[in-house]
Amino acid sequence: MTGWLTRGLPSAGIYAGPTAWLISTQANYALVPWVCANQIRIIPLVAVMMAAASLLGGFLSWRGYITAAPTPHPDSTGAGRPHRFVALIGVGIALLFTAVIIIHGIAGMVFHGCER
Amino acid sequence: MTQTLAPHDVALDAVPEPTRLLTGQPAGMPGVQSEADAPPDPRELRDDQVDGQELTARLARTWGTRKGIIGALSTVDHKIIGRRYIITAFIFLFLGGLSAVAMRMQLARPESGLIGPDLYNQLFTMHGTTMMFLFGVPIGEAFAVFLLPLMLGTRNIAFARLNAYSYYVYLFGGAMIWFAFMLNIGPDVGWFAYVPLSGPEFSPGKRVDFWAQMITFTEVAGIAVAVQIVVTVFKMRAPGMTLDRIPLFVWAELVNAFIIIFALPAVVTASVMLIMDRLVGTHFFNPAEGGDALLYQHLFWFFGHPEVYIIFIPATGWVSAIVVTFSRRQAFGYIPLVLSMIATGFLSFGLWVHHMFTTGLPQLGASFFTASSMLIAIPNGIQIFCWIATLWDGRPVFRTPLLFVMGFFFIFVAGGLSGIMLASVPIDAQVHDTMFVVAHFHYVLIGGNVFPLLGAVYYWFPKFTGRMMSERLGKWHFWLAFIGFNITFFPMHITGLMGMPRRVYTYLPEMGWGNLNLISTLGATMLFASFVVFLVNVVVSARRGALAGPNPWDAGTLEWATSSPPLPQNFDRIPVVTNREPLWAHRNTLPVVAGLSVENREVIISTATAGRADLKESSPEPSIWPFLAAIATTVTFIGSIFTPWAIVWGGLPTTITLLGWFWPKGVKEDEA
Amino acid sequence: MTASPHQPLSTRLHHNVVLNVRRLPSYGHGSRSSQWWGIMGFCAAEGIGFVLAFGAYFYLVFINGVWPLSSKPPDIYTSTFHTALMLASLWPNYLARKYSEREDLLKVRRYLVIMSVLGAALLGLRVVEIALLHTKWDHNAYGSIVWLLLGFHTLHLVTDVVNTIVLTVLMFTRHGHGRRFNNVGQNADYWTFVVAAWIPLYVIVYLFPRW
């Protein structure tokens, strides 16, 4: 487990970010009637958990980038190292989707859930 | 940046050692003697034994299409099918455009009697349906079918027979709905066919059934081509083309294919439920029996919003290709561009509820979709900035393709701004179903798809036909289209804010919308004229244009390494890729692979990430069966409009044709 | 624009052969082959179809509150037997795939025959099962969605059973060697998908209305 954490997984962010966002969107959307009925602001909590999941994916991608082999050398366009490329994309995707998820959480702080 | 290649950079583009280009793994499990590992038949001629003209001629014979009508219908050449696909999609674009011109004529003045309400309803339905399903989705795939194997350095698309089948199914589905329209049974319920209007109670007759079945046709074809694209990109790249050397256009088509695979099943589900409600008495959308009309909207828009990106994402590929070539430098921000495409692809699935803001959903629920709708502007913005940076840092050459890209920047950004306005619930509630929305999405769709598409036609026309299009006519075309478009659609923002609703066949003079509508119609005439110029340019250039040669634009991607138009085999030998812009890195000699068969259709299958050559699989021979299977499918689908039993008795001929398709015939296929 | 559009037509890049692929295998098993990726692509599209149909089912549950509306829940015994048989079929299916990768023709034939018989039996059971649904598609929205789910899955079942039978026949002809083993593996993968789609369907259609 720790070895996995240090070595990382280049593509983790590409799956984790969107999956967390998908769960955040669907779960929060389904929770709205419940939030309205019980007046418990659970949506920011869901959002924080999902943002953490997304960031974990981003972290694994970043580790994957750091620990990737320094060879082969990139060509004159900077290409030729697909694992590093996938890792960078993973970090970027995870960060972007974390931002979207956090905004979902903020919406849960602004609305009560009963507004029509 | 080819012009600044320093000596040490050249070393970077050297061909890596063969271990990096080959996996060298046997096919058999440990201890198992697999037939796949048998040494090649020494009698079979391979391309390391012949060279030059003889190699070219022999390969052209092996990969060629037979003459005659049977040969033409049996072809599996991606270039022939791709060309047909592109032409067919353009014919539908013109038909959709003509129906729009007819509507503009009707709206030019208040209380016009040119077109009655029933025909008008059919016209706007056919216009939307054609543009979205028969032009928007297929045109991106059509370009992919023609260009992807060339850009990836292979000889055909994956599952070439399925490719032929998909094209025929698409053609027959599109032809069916237009014939229905000519027989006055065209759909008249809008391109989305909302229930209850489209349900059995309010739309008796067969009009909506034709619409629903057209969906089935085009989506079957669309998903099949998307799978072919994914497999071609992942498994058929030339050795050395690692994931980060894939051309941006190919990335765009790959992301697009994934969106199609995940979005199209939703609209098929919706249309199947609709046609079952209408024909066999199910109650999916009937509230009296526990159904719900909003279920249809949810399913439809789960497809419908990604559809916008299915239309837009291929255009980002066209723009990227054109910007890079005409800036004379590699793309600024390759990674952010790819990242944006992927992120947009994912986010497009989280926006659909924003089409339903006026259906009384809870505001908190809607706000999640507002959030994603707003933030999708980030990846789209990143793309625009990367393209501008590429142009800024390069030495842009303003030929017609780049002009159309400039037009795209202007129009698409304007459409994006009105899109941000519409993402906010209060504004959306105010202008929902008005001409403002019509203006917005035409800015996005025409700006985001048609302008880059026209640029792409000017750009790749030399590759398609071997001849250049006229620059002079091209400039006329661009300015007529750009000015005509803005005159047509800009006033619609204002008519919309003045309260003019969509989908009305006429209006009263005292509403005060007459002048603006007349201006829009004049603009539409100009836009129409621009397409006439385009058509003339295409037809004349295809016959008498200047000869192009393999690489008229001095571009860097692999499709320009072969002759224009390419021979059936695409490449005499498969290239080895050492750079993102292979032709800029290797200006005189192309590193290539040898050892493939000259007598049989062999393609290299490579690994998904590192692009190492792994297998040499065989690629399908031409066959008439896909065409026959498409006919059987068509008979089944059209028959099912009239009796559900058609599914049962149409199943038999379909199965037989599929058997004919897949059953191995000659020794050729069996051996490989 | 440095290059003029008037390059001589015969301009051909000189070839520098750097790699020879003469000795590459002519097919590979599992994810090495291109067809495996194609099958996965279609599984993804059809899987989304199932997910959306499940979503529609729960949407209707949510809208109505009472479920299964005015109908009786479907018969559970046949369907449980059907499910058990489906799960059991995964074993010979796995073996067919395994021996196809070893290119062991006799064993592949044996397990393909077993899979064909099992598939036909499952189809027969499916007919009984549909007869015991206690609702019709035109009864109410519950009946409609249940018939849609079962119909959609039965379509997959029929497709794969027909495919298995054709493949079984093929392996008894002179074509039964080489690349055909590859097709056996892919057919087995598709069958796994058909079973995987059935499990949630069984839970939703047969267990959920009884809760």
Image (cartoon, grey):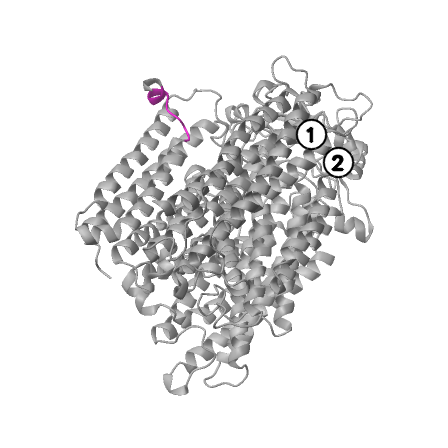
Secondary structure found at label 1: helix
Residue found at x 61% / y 43%: C158
Q: Is residue B17 left or right of residue C25?
A: left
Quadrant of the rendered image containing residue B90: bottom right
Question: Where's the C terminus of chain B, which quadrant?
Answer: top right
Chain under callout 1: C
Of residues B602 and B560, the one drawn nearer to the viewer in this rendering: B602
Find out whether the residues at labels 1 and 2 contact each other: C-beta distance under 8 Å.
yes
Q: Is residue A35 left or right of residue B639?
A: left
In the depicted structure, whether residue C9 falls above or below residue A33 = above
Whether residue A9 appears in magenta in the rendering, the answer is yes
Provide the residue designation for mark 1: C180
On the question of residue C150 being in view, the answer is yes
Magenta segment boundaries in residue numbering? A4-11
The mark tally for this picture is: 2
In the depicted structure, whether residue B554 falls above or below residue B311 = above
How dense is the environment of label 1, judged by Cα within 10 Å: few (below 14), some, or many (20 and up)?
some
Provide the residue designation for mark 2: B664
As drawn, the residue found furthest toward the top would be B31
Residue C40 in percent (x, y) is at 54, 37
Residue B221 in percent (x, y) is at 60, 51
Secondary structure found at label 2: loop
The kind of residue tagged 1 is: Arg
Whether residue B68 appears in magenta in the rendering, the answer is no
The kind of residue tagged 2 is: Pro
Quadrant of the rendered image containing residue B353: bottom left
Residue C134 in percent (x, y) is at 47, 52
Per the rendering, the mark at residue B558 is: none
On the question of residue B556 being in view, the answer is no
